[in-house]
Image: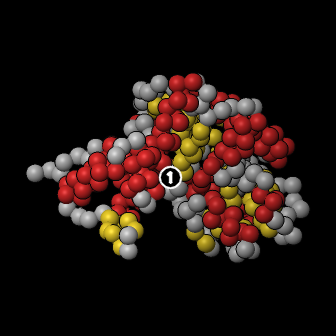
Amino acid sequence: MPNPKLKERQIEIFRTIMATGSLTVAARHLGVSQPSLSTAIKRLEDQLGIALFARISGRLVPTQEAELILAEVEHVHQQAEILSDVIYSIARGDASTFRFGSTPSLGARLIPKALKRLQQQGTAGTFYSDSLSQRDVRDYLLFGQGACVATIAEVNDPVIQTVPIATAGLVCVVPAGHPLAGRRSVRPADLSDEQLISFGATTTHGLLIDQTYQRWGETRKTAVYVHFVDAALAFVAERIGISVLDAFSAIDCDVHGLVAIPIENSASVSAYVHVCDRRPRQKGVDSLITALREIAAAVTNTQAGAKTDE
């Protein structure tokens, strides 16, 4: 037989006794007689099959089981209060929740800057920002886990709508003070003697980098393989080597003592926002797209003078 479900009143009585440490005070607080309260707690103990309180030297002392139960009760109580606040906020129309994802290239710098802009514009609500690998993007959208995903890779699916944000190029990231740091642009041949921190040939970055090297008749030689751009930036900061990244990933890298140098005639890197056209489109999607475009424009303008005809 399944355990009988506890009533809300039973939990309220238990919580009040635990808070006051006294049947007399608890009865007064709940507006009932002490004998009826004693009966109620005895019935709860019988239902659970354990003792919740013991009388020691005239004091009401909770058992270890009672302390464990209280911890769970308080957790649920706090969650219920949060839920109540959220429901009332939605009913008033003064709050909204916007959940979206991004892959590391855009999630490292472009997304934070876009969210900051939205806040400065007075966009209210709660944001949930999920970090995704490229292979998770399709399911994330199809199963409604988030409203949209920002990434530098396309998603080929008939129910996924792709919105272009901006196009930039690749940059070489080196530590400040590196011999290449003062250059306005570099070519793959300029990196041949460097320890290259780079990506596998089948990744989005790896494909773009190899495409750029092939344009110059060069072959990429990788000394350290990484999977995410934040690892590449961290390794460059430790002066393990240099790296080639998309320009979006390298935004404001100077704050970490790094310099991003445009690579001449590099492959184009496009930033996209993907949405599932089988689901209602949240207002936050369009606001995020606008903010991303405004932030990305500064990156593309910086690189405009460094690229030669492709």
- Residue 285 seen in the current view: no
Q: Is 58 above or below relative to 138?
A: below
Q: Position of residue 258 (x, y in %)?
A: 79, 63
Q: Which residue sits at x=52%, y=24%? A: 91
Near-viewer residue (75 or 252): 75
Q: Which residue sits at x=70%, y=50%? A: 109
Q: Position of residue 304 (x, y in %)?
A: 81, 41
Asked whether, in this view, residue 305 is left or right of residue 129, the answer is right
| Marker count (numbered) | 1
Asked whether, in this view, residue 136 is left or right of residue 5, the answer is right
* Disc 1: which residue: 133
- Residue 240 seen in the current view: yes
Q: Is 6 above or below relative to 23?
A: above
Residue projecting furthest to the left: 1
Residue 260, quarter of the rendered image: bottom right
Q: Amino acid at mark 1?
A: Ser
Q: Residues within 10 Å of mark 1 (few under 14, many from 20)?
A: few
Q: Which residue sits at x=25%, y=52%? A: 39
Q: Is 243 above or below relative to 107?
A: below
Q: Is label 1 in a helix, a strand or a loop? A: loop
Q: Which residue sits at x=63%, y=65%? A: 231
Residue projecting furthest to the right: 182
Figure quadrant of the C terminus: top right
Q: Position of residue 160 (x, y in %)?
A: 46, 32
Q: Position of residue 243 (x, y in %)?
A: 69, 64
Indicate the colouring scheme.
Answer: secondary structure
Near-viewer residue (120 or 95): 95
Near-viewer residue (17 or 152): 17
Residue 296, quarter of the rendered image: top right
